[in-house]
Amino acid sequence: MSEIPSRTVFFVSDGTGITAETLGHSLLAQFGNTHFHQVRIPFIDTIDKARACARQIRDTAQQIAHRPIVFSTLVKPGTIDALREAADCALFLDLFECFIGPLEGELGQPSTHTVGRFHDIAESHDYQNRIEAINFAMSHDDGISKASDLVEADVILVGVSRSGKTPTSLYLAMQFGVKAANYPLIPEDFERNKLPGELNDHRDKLFGLSIAPERLSQIRQERRPNSPYASLTNCRYEIEAAQKLMRRENIRWFDSTTKSIEEISATIMQTVRIVQKY
Amino acid sequence: MSEIPSRTVFFVSDGTGITAETLGHSLLAQFGNTHFHQVRIPFIDTIDKARACARQIRDTAQQIAHRPIVFSTLVKPGTIDALREAADCALFLDLFECFIGPLEGELGQPSTHTVGRFHDIAESHDYQNRIEAINFAMSHDDGISKASDLVEADVILVGVSRSGKTPTSLYLAMQFGVKAANYPLIPEDFERNKLPGELNDHRDKLFGLSIAPERLSQIRQERRPNSPYASLTNCRYEIEAAQKLMRRENIRWFDSTTKSIEEISATIMQTVRIVQKY
C-alpha cells in the first residue's frame, strides 16, 4: 500500500503542553512521509493523572499498528515514574532528561516547572515586547502606517498584494518581538516607478518579498476568482514591475514562493541584522 | 551584587535555526533568574563554517564569566565533530542526539535535515491551514466579521476592549491553525444586557476573556492616557458588566490577567475542545 503511514504522538506536560508541543512540531516537521495524529495532554500534575495518562497510551498502543511516540515534560519524579509505566509500549522522548536537567545543573537554579508554579511569563519584559510587536504589526499592516510611526519599525516589508507580507510581519512579532510594518507595492507605484514616499527615510529597514507569478495568481484566485487582479497576465506584470522597482531602488529582496514564514523570517533576521529584542 | 546573572546562548543550525531557537525559547523561559544573551547562527552546512562557529564559541567563552550554552541541530557527522571542537568550553545540548536520531530510528526514515534539503513545509497542508487561519484572524478581528463567516470559525473570543483577544486569536492561528474570530463587548451590549446578535447561533464556540480592572486600566492608559476609556472607574464598570453578561449567557470565560497568550490558548484549546487542524 502506498498510503502515508500514521503515528500517534502524545505531548504530556504538567503545564500547558506548549513546550513539548512546540518542540514536537519542529521535530515532526522533519519527517515528511508520516502523518502524525497529535494528542495534547496538559496539566498532568499528580501521580494519579500520570497513571491515567499511561493507561491511555497503553490502550492506544494496543489499537494501532505502530507504537506511539511520547514527548514528556514532566519533572516530578513521582509523575515521571507513573507515566513510565507505559514505557514498554511507546517511544519516550523526555525533555527533562535531555535538557531541563542539564540546564538546571549548569545554571545552578531549579526550573520554574520543577518548583511547581508557572513562570510568570506574562509579566516579563520579553513577553511585553512580543505583545507590543503584535499590536504594532496589526496597526501597521498593508500600508496603513503614519509616516511618523515608521521610526519605531525594526523592519518594513514591501511587495505586491498577497506576497506573504502580513503573515511574515506577524510571525516576526510573535517569535522574535520584532516590529514589522508592511507596504503593498501597487500599480500606481509602478507607473511612477517610485516607492511610496513615506519609505524614503527608512531605506535601511526595507526588505522586499517576491513570488512566482503562477503561485501569486493561484493565491489571488482563491480570494477573487476570475478577477483581473488574479489573472496570470496581471500577476506577471505586477511581479516584473515590482522586481524592477526593487532593483532600481536597491532594496534587498528574495523570492518567497516555496518558503514558509519561518524561513522568510529567519532570512530577514539575518539580512536586516535586527537587534533581537530578547 | 544582586544583578541578574547573564549567559550567552548559541543556536547553531544547518537550516534556519528556528527549531533550535523555538526549543531554546521554551526551555530558557523556565529559568527566570538569568538574562540570556542569544546568538542565532544559521546555515552552518559545511565543516569550515562549523569550525569558524566553534572558534566564535571559544572566543566568547574566554571573554565572559560563565561558559556559554550551545543548542545544536547539526546533523552531519563532519559538522558536528567540527563544532564539538568547542565542547570543552560550553554546555552542549544536542537536538539530534536527543531526538532526531531516535525518531529516525523509530520511523525508519531520515529527517529532511539529514538528507540535506529543507522540508518543503510551505507546500504542506498543515502550513496552508495555519496561513489561512492567520488571514481569518486578521479579517475577523474586533467584531468585523460578517455573520455568515462565523460558521467557519473554530472559536469566537469575546471580552472588553484590550482584554487580550487579538494576540490570542493570532497565536491560536499561528501555533494551532485554529480559526478564531473575536468580538469586543462594548457599553451598548451592557446596556442591552445582551450579546451581539450575530453570536446567538454560535454559542458553543464562544469563549470569554476577563482581566483585572487595574491591569486593564494600565494597558488602556498606554493607548489613551487620561481618557475616560482608560479610567479605573470605567474599567471596573466594564469588567463587572461583562462578567455579569457572560454569566447570564452561560459563556465559559476565564481571567487572563497574569496569563500569557500561550497559556490562554492552551486553556481555550482544552475547554472548547477544538479539533486540531494538523
Image: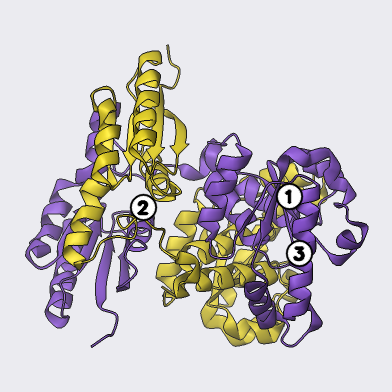
Chain colours: A purple, B yellow
Instruction: Pick the quarter of the image with the N terminus of chain A.
Output: bottom left
The span from disc 1 to disc 3 (Cα, nearest Å) is 56 Å
Please report, as a chain letter, where disc 1 is located: B
Taking A110 as reference, is B184 above or below it? below
Regarding residue B178, the answer to whether it shows in the image is: no
Taking B59 as reference, is A76 above or below it? below
Taking A73 as reference, is A70 above or below it? below
Q: In the picture, residue B64 is in which quadrant?
A: top left
- Circle 2 sits on which residue? A19
x, y percentage for residue A82? Answer: 12, 58
The span from disc 2 to disc 1 (Cα, nearest Å) is 38 Å
Instruction: Check chain identity for marks 2 and 3: say if they share one.
Output: yes
Please report, as a chain letter, where disc 3 is located: A
- Circle 3 sits on which residue? A240
x, y percentage for residue A55? Answer: 14, 70
Q: Nearer the viewer, mark 2 or mark 3?
A: 3
Q: What label sits on residue B233 in the rendered view?
A: 1
Judge the density around disc 1: few (<14), some (14-19), many (≥20) Cα neighbours within 10 Å: few
Regarding residue B115, the answer to whether it shows in the image is: yes
Q: Residue B71 versus residue B178: which sits nearer the camera?
A: B71
